[in-house]
Image: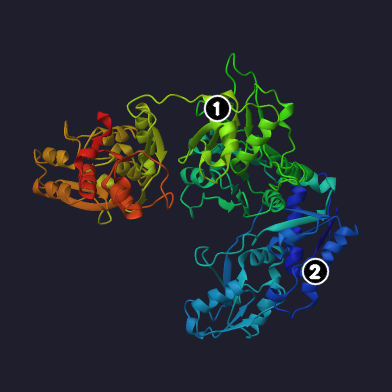
């Protein structure tokens, strides 16, 4: 194969490295490199930020199109914006990325850190580097610099600049390809940490550009791309995503997510943003009348991220195959021969019917059903055809009148649909229902008949968001409300750490838990005091399951050297046992900080070294009791309880469950105490009860969840 590259020493050096890599991967193919001059090589005066998008690729693209070369090797950051690459060209990134950092280059006798005051002029080739250099050397002159890397270094050695900002990748490749290109004895390099100067995502990456449809290069690309995962997120509740989908998310490099379920699901499954394991998140959600990105752009973006060698997850609400535009996105990948995997999921159809009792099939009542969306098939718009009626490509007359109908996204047209169905033979007494936010915190079901709905569309209220319209016998049934909570909606305000247990407790009593965490636990990074290790203490005091979890997430020592543990109750002890240890001191009845203090008072701790780990909002009582018992105490804040809220407005709810005083304070701060009036208030622990009592002034409304 004939390989094109720019004629600079760096470009030829990196092309040689790329060809060597490809020859190792595909030994049956031989390669010949030919230099091709581009506008960026001929024009050394135009600043790069003012140059045309194809400044460094135009002539190479022409050579590819004309068949003079089979493919071109580029620095990936030299490519024009990916959305502007013509459709007759295709591309992919090579996986062997060089060092992505930027680097200070100075004359060795000038240096950088040792002679910063002598840095009076700096060669700059981008706005990003200009801003960084201005911050580091506010008194220096920032001058434009152009030319190949070896030419820039020569300008530095000639004294035109005191320092130059460059990419480490180019320096490494040039030195590896042609050691004589840089006089190592005369320059000094100082890499800049990624945290100080974030490089473009393509810095250090090489790209291959070839003619679209070239089977040889398409086959070659198969070795470097990963299958795209289409993950169905489910609806309403993040727990309805499948285990396979959750696993895909945990391994993703890039996630393109929709409005429906995307944010909530990702918040629970992803590591803290900014960590090395964090994927890139791209919001591509579409709501009725408001699209953040057009469908063609989404399809292109999926393909682009896959061609970069990223593991891409396309996270779609409900089940991806039901009105989710899955076919268009899969077709785009198929055209490029990029593999993909589709994970089915729980759709709004299932959640709105199976989850509510509006079953679409019942023995002796209905043996099937029909599902459709009241929109034109041709343009997928919601506009109505001339002459009135619903913009639907379906005729209800074709359906069996004794089988249920389900219409997606039908809130706005339910009244018109009712009229049309009546005109086609359905009776006025036929039950119908609208289900909104199926399985979600704002789920609601409104039931009526076709006759009532046709006469007064407002019978379903004024809720405007998309819903599922169900017509037929299925709409006459609902699951009964049983148990102590009898289907009541309970707002569960605990942190994510204890959400699961709280929700299970609510469901045990027949309630419907609404996940609404109002506090977030933020570790402070310290698990010891005064520079010591946990193993150096005689005892560690932990008074909540969360403190146990955060401690073991932060500590990576030898379990055999851990000291004794003092805890305040069975919940904390149970969490300890998941890590292979247990409590040495624990109350037998009063499972609280006060109960632990009573146990500590029975001990002689004279001369003992004790580490007290707590939340920022915990009081000093335990530490004081330890000191009174003779211990030398390091009182360390392990984490803070930070107020948060899933939304500015609360979903409809009947009761609230608080597991901490912090959650009570957060609720009042976000929504005001008035929202608690008339609600059942359930608490865990005496401090939480006291906080609710102080806020509401009505203790008679407060219950312990375990007593219900």
Q: Residues within 10 Å of mark 2 (few under 14, many from 20)?
A: some
With 550 as the anchor, is 344 left or right in this view?
A: right
Q: Is residue 539 visible?
A: no
Q: Nearer the viewer, residue 359 or 112?
A: 359
Q: Nearer the viewer, residue 378 or 30?
A: 378
Q: Nearer the viewer, residue 194 or 86?
A: 86
Q: Which marked residue is nearer to the observer: mark 2 or mark 1?
A: 1
Image position, residue 585 (x, y; %): 18, 35
Residue at 65% over, 60% down: 202
Furthest-top residue in this view: 364
With 380 as the anchor, is 699 left or right in this view?
A: left
Image position, residue 650 (x, y; %): 41, 47
Q: Earlier in the sequence, mark 2 or mark 1?
A: 2
Q: Is residue 483 above or below residue 392?
A: above
Query: Callout 2: helix, strand or loop?
Result: loop
Residue at 55% over, 64% down: 198
Query: Hey, which quadrant is residue 153 in on the image?
Result: bottom right
Q: Which mark is residue 208?
A: none
- Quarter of the image with the C terminus is top left
Query: Hey, which quadrant is residue 352 in on the image?
Result: top right
Q: Is residue 388 visible?
A: yes
Image position, residue 416 (x, y; %): 64, 40
Residue that label 2 marks: 7
Marks 2 and 1, how far apart at CA: 72 Å
Residue that label 1 marks: 475
């Amino acid at each position: 194969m004939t390989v094109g590259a720019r004629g600079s020493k760096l470009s030829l050096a990196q092309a040689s490295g790329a060809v060597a890599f490809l020859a190792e991967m595909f030994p049956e193919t031989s390669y010949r490199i030919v230099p091709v001059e581009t506008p960026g090589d001929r024009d050394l005066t135009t600043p790069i930020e003012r140059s045309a998008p194809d400044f460094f690729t135009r002539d190479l693209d022409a050579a590819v199109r004309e068949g003079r070369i089979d493919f071109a090797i580029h620095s990936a950051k030299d490519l024009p914006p990916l959305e502007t690459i013509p459709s007759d060209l295709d591309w992919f990134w090579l996986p062997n990325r060089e060092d992505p950092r930027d680097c200070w280059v100075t004359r060795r006798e000038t240096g950088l850190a040792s002679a910063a005051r002598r840095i009076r002029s700096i060669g700059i080739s981008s706005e990003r580097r200009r801003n960084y250099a201005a911050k580091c050397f506010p008194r220096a002159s920032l001058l434009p610099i152009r030319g190949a890397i070896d030419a820039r270094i020569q300008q530095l050695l000639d004294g035109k600049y005191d320092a130059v900002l460059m990419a480490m990748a180019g320096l490494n490749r040039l030195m590896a390809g042609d050691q004589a290109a840089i006089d190592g004895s005369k320059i000094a390099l100082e890499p800049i940490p990624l945290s100080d100067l974030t490089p473009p995502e393509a810095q250090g990456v090489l790209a291959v550009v070839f003619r679209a449809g070239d089977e040889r290069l398409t086959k070659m690309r198969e070795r470097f791309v990963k299958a795209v995962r289409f993950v169905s997120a489910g609806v309403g509740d993040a727990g309805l995503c499948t285990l396979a989908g959750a696993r895909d998310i945990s391994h993703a490099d890039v996630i393109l997510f929709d409005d429906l379920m995307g944010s909530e699901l990702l918040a629970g499954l992803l590591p803290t943003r900014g960590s090395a394991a964090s994927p890139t998140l791209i919001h591509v959600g579409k709501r009725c009348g408001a699209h953040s990105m057009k469908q063609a752009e989404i399809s292109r973006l999926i393909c682009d991220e896959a061609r970069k060698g990223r593991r891409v997850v396309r996270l779609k609400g409900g089940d991806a195959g039901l009105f989710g535009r899955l076919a268009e996105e899969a077709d785009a990948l198929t055209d490029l021969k990029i593999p993909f995997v589709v994970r089915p999921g729980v759709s709004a159809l299932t959640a709105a019917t199976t989850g509510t009792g509006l079953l679409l099939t019942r023995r002796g009542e209905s043996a099937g059903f029909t599902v459709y969306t009241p929109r034109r098939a041709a343009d997928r718009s919601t506009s109505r055809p001339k002459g009135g009626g619903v913009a639907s490509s379906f005729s209800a007359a074709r359906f069996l009148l004794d089988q249920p109908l389900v219409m997606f996204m039908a809130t706005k047209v339910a009244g018109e649909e009712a009229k049309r169905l009546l005109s086609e033979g359905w009776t006025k007494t036929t039950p119908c229902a609208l289900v909104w936010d199926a399985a979600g915190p704002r789920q609601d079901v409104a039931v009526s008949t076709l006759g009532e709905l046709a006469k007064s569309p407002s019978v379903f209220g004024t809720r405007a968001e998309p819903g599922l319209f169900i017509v037929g016998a299925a709409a006459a049934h609902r699951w009964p409300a049983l148990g102590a909570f009898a289907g009541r909606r309970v707002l569960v305000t605990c942190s994510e750490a204890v959400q699961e247990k709280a929700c299970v407790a609510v469901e045990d009593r027949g309630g419907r838990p609404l996940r609404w965490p109002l506090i977030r636990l933020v570790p402070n990074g310290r698990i010891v005091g005064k520079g010591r290790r946990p193993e150096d203490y005689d005892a560690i005091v932990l008074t909540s399951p969360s403190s146990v979890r955060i401690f073991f997430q932060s500590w990576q020592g030898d379990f055999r050297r851990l000291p004794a543990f003092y805890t305040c109750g069975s919940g904390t002890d149970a969490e300890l046992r998941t890590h292979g240890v247990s409590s040495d001191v624990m109350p037998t009845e009063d499972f609280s900080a006060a109960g632990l203090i009573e146990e500590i008072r029975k001990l002689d701790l004279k001369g003992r070294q004790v580490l007290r780990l707590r939340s920022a909002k915990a009081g000093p009582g335990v530490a004081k009791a330890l000191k009174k018992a003779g211990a030398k105490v390091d009182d360390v804040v392990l984490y803070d309880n930070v107020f948060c809220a899933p939304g500015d407005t609360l979903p409809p709810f009947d009761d609230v469950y608080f597991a901490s005083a912090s959650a009570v304070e957060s609720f009042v701060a976000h929504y005001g105490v008035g929202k608690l009036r008339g609600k059942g208030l359930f608490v865990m622990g005496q401090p939480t009860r006291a906080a609710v009592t102080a806020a509401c002034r009505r203790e008679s409304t407060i219950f312990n969840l375990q007593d219900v």
